[in-house]
Image (cartoon, grey):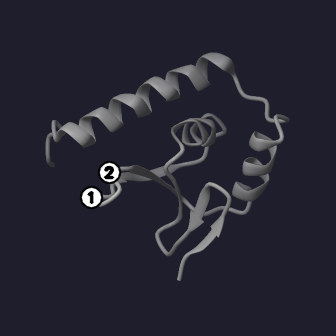
Amino acid sequence: MNESSGDIIEGEEGYQTCDLYLAAFFQSTGSKMLKATRDIRSKRVYFIFEKNETMNDLRVSYFSREAKVDALTYADNIKSLKSLCHNITTGSMIPR
């Protein structure tokens, strides 16, 4: 069963979001991204993060504009996730 909390869905795999900027923020705080998948029906890319007890606090600080992260790290993570989304949606990822 999935439990939704704002832009985060808690599932068996971990926490997932389709919000690219929130995902970049999570990465910038050291949260571990497990994988990214594309929902065929909605065509959205979902970023799945490892479960930890700080995710809700991070989400609250992000949306309340109280979060502090390194600006260059955040910008780099946005670029990296945009590239990942492009690769997933165009099918140009190399299977391993």
Disc 2 packing (10 Å; few <14; some 14–19; many ≥20): few
Q: In the image, which disc is placed on residue 43? A: 2
- Left or right of 68 in this view: 49: left
Say what secondary structure mark 1 lies in.
Answer: loop
Q: Position of residue 12 (x, y in %)?
A: 49, 75
Q: Which mark is residue 84?
A: none
Q: Which picture quadrant has residue 83? A: top left
Instruction: Judge whether 25 appears above or below 55 on screen.
Output: above
Question: Who's the residue at 49% across and 49% down the image?
Answer: 18
Front in this rendered view, residue 95 or 87:
87
Relative to 36, 87 lies left or right: left
For disc 1, the marked residue is 40
Q: Position of residue 49 (x, y in %)?
A: 52, 55
Residue 17, above or below 4: above
How many numbered marks does the figure carry?
2
Q: Amino acid at mark 1?
A: Ile
Extreme residue in the bottom direction: 1
Q: Position of residue 55 (x, y in %)?
A: 69, 56
Q: Secondary structure at mark 2?
A: loop
Residue occupying image coordinates x 26% and y 42%:
88
Q: Residue at x 46, y 69 (%)?
A: 13
Spot occupied by residue 92 in the image (x, y as percentages of width and height): 16, 36
Q: Quick one: label 1, few (<14), some, or many (20+) residues within 10 Å? A: few
- Which residue lies at the image location 55% right of the left edge and 76% below the top edge? 2
User: Cβ–Cβ below 8 Å for labels 2 and 1?
Assistant: yes
Q: Quadrant of residue 80?
A: top left
Name the foreground residue: 84 vs 40: 40
